[in-house]
Image (cartoon, rainbow, N blue to C red):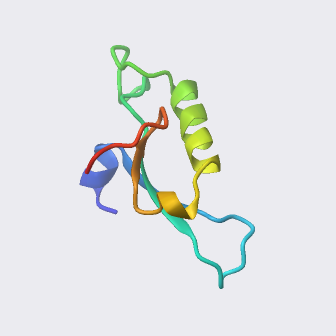
Amino acid sequence: MTSNTADSGRTVFITGAGRGLGQALAVLSLHRGWVRTDMGGERAMVAARHSANGLKRTIDGASMADSGSFYAYDGKQVAW
């Protein structure tokens, strides 16, 4: 991953913890949103906890049908 990709807030996450290596994994692109942090600043629209909780819900609910999709922290699919 390049720093340019990291700066844009896009992260690749592989879901499949606890599965054997021989099984298929779903791969998602995730957008954490504009998060209120030192980097995002106080004007950012999303609290860090809200972003993290939303990403966790999205990851936990992912299936193989979602593989290759891009989702925002709020669970909405992002066109790309």
Residue 65 appears in the figure: yes
Q: Toward the viewer: 46 or 62? A: 62
Instruction: Specify whether 54 is left or right of 28.
Output: right
Could you say which quadrant of the image residue 23 lies in?
Answer: bottom right
Displayed quadrant of residue 37: top left
Q: Residue furthest top?
A: 43
57 on left or right of 3: right
Direction from residue 11 to residue 80 in the image, left or right: left
Residue 70 position in % (x across, y down): 38, 50
Q: Position of residue 32 (x, y in %)?
A: 43, 38
Q: Residue at x 65, y 85 (%)?
A: 22
Q: Is residue 76 above or below residue 35?
A: below
Query: Which image quadrant is residue 14 in?
Result: bottom right
Residue 34 drawn at (x, y percent): 36, 28
Q: Residue at x 33, y 14 (%)?
A: 43
Q: Is residue 13 at least partly visible in the picture?
A: no
Quadrant position of the N terminus in the picture? bottom left
* Picture layout, residue 28 above or below residue 20: above
Q: Taking 60 as reference, is 12 left or right?
A: left
Of all residues shown, which one is farthest toward the bottom? 22
Q: Tell me what residue is drawn at x 51 percent, y 61 percent.
A: 65
In the current view of this chain or complex, which residue is farthest to the right? 18
Tell me what residue is drawn at x 55 percent, y 34 percent: 54
